[in-house]
Amino acid sequence: MLSAVEGIDVYAPEYHELIVPLSLLVLAGLFAVQRFGTASVGRAFGPLMLVWFTSLAALGLPSIIENPAVLAALNPQHALRFGLDNGWIAFVALGAVVLVVTGGEALYADLGHFGKRPIRVAWYGVVMPALVLNYFGQGALLLRDPEAIKNPFYLIAPDWAEIPLFILATMAAIVASQALITAAFSVTKQAIQLGILPRMRILHTSVRDTGQIYVPFINWMLFAFVVVAVSFFGSSSKLAGAYGVAVTIDMTITTVMTFFVIRHGWKYPLPLCILATIFFFIIDVAFLSSNLLKLFAGGWFPLAIGLAMFTLMLTWRQGSALLRERLRDEAIPLQDFLDAVFVHPPTRVAGTAVFMTPDPGLTPTAMMHNLKHNKVLHERNLFVTVCHHDVPWVGFNQRVQVDALGHDCWAVTLNFGFKNEPDVPQALSLLKTHGVVLDDMDTSYFLSRDIVIPALGQGMAMWREKLFAGLHRNAAAAADFLRLPTNRVVELGSKVEI
């Protein structure tokens, strides 16, 4: 957004001070409309991007025709000679050169959504040719007029196109920003279901597309970081160091992870996997090392955010494991508990009780509290465990697993992928194929609401236990996350020391 709005410096340098406020104003509006959903805006993204890349090509081509000598840069011999003749300078230049190709990795990040063919057609048919023509056009402009280095992108345009290009660039920046925000929502939801982030309030902005979601906390936290970044750095050139470090670390991590995909997923020979990974790893490390020279000029910013997020995720994951372990130590095996209860069964009341439990085979705390205080047992009892698996989708044919426990009691496991929508009532409706028919208006859902108490011991450091306790206390209600009917939920809590 900063780089787009910086066109003001070219067209009206006297308004330079408006760059940061205007960027923040546009971004504030973008974040504010997220709660309304992106379906209607998204339909305009494709045509707008097509106009954008067509414009990039149209701007670069006349400049190339005017000074075709720039095409000599297609010969890699020039880059090689530059590297050999200017060792240290060439190494430093890598940090700037890599910014030319950033964004391509974001296109391929959508591979899972669109498949290989649309991505390849878009990249080779539209994006890459347009970028190459525009960059070479800028190069041709700089060969003719070195003074244009202050902003070759905007200066390559004819005078009549100044304002339209400024508007188009700003709109393209909005699209790019929207893609980032949407991806943040999607990744957050998947991280929650994988158990590495606490539950958050997730709103669905479309009745037809489950992928259209809005996460208020992430939206405004991201906006806060954007405000800090834009206000602190103030220009795209100063922000380039932070951006370069973030992107090159991402590329390096991706290369390392690719080894496990091609080796264990695609079953390629080990020597080939090692050689291919080393080849790309060397390239990525070279770019990363060059960008790390900007560590104290902004490169620390994404590292600080990454470290904070890693600490939060690790604390949540380890804290959740400690909580489950403590609850497991104090729990009673479910089958033994039921056998003991039915020796002298309590009063049975009409209806179905669904007890949500994280550990199949163990008696839910909510059930023990219900028996202790209400001294009744429902006519039918389901002990339901929701499992999120490390795969994107789990089909309906594998959604439900049922084990009969006797006395009209069943242990039920619901399986979801990290892209599935965890809808417990809908999943339980599949039980009718197993002979268990539920009446929605006669079914109550019992949940355990545990209060975490940090304590000195063999767990985490005290500050991390307090952090986990705060995250656990402020996590969104499980009933909302599992889409349980609010008027049928009963929560029974207890205090647990970790």
Image (spheres, rainbow, N blue to C red):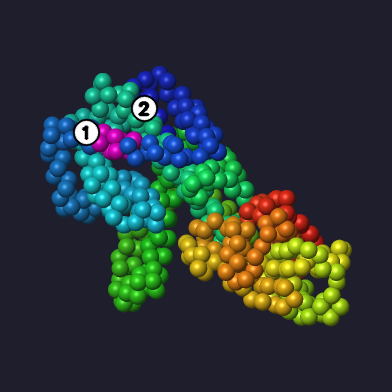
Q: Which residue is mark 2?
A: 167
**Is residue 186 found inside the magenta-colored segment of the image?**
no
First along the sequence among labels 2 and 1? 1
Rendered image quadrant of residue 307: bottom right
Query: Is residue 194 at least partly visible in the picture?
Result: yes
Q: Position of residue 256 (x, y in %)?
A: 40, 65
The crowd level at tag 2 (other Cα within 10 Å; few <14, some 14-19, many 20+) is some
Q: Would you call the spot at circle 1 few (<14 residues within 10 Å), some (14-19), or many (20 or more)? A: some
**In the depicted structure, whether residue 18 falls above or below residue 465:** above
Rendered-image quadrant of the N terminus: top left
Question: As drawn, is 423 to the left or to the right of 243?
Answer: right
**Range of the magenta residues?**
48-56
Give me the residue at 43% from left, 36% from top: 41
Residue 49 on the magenta segment: yes
- Locate residue 49 relative to residue 397 in the image: left or right: left
Look at the numbered disc 2 and give the secondary structure of its residue. Answer: helix
In percent of width and height, residue 321 lies at 65, 67
Magenta portion: prevailing SS class: helix
Which label was assigned to residue 87? none
Residue at numbered disc 1:
58
Relative horizontal placement of residue 286, taking residue 73 as reference (left or right): right
At 32% from the left and 59% from the top, the residue drawn is 283
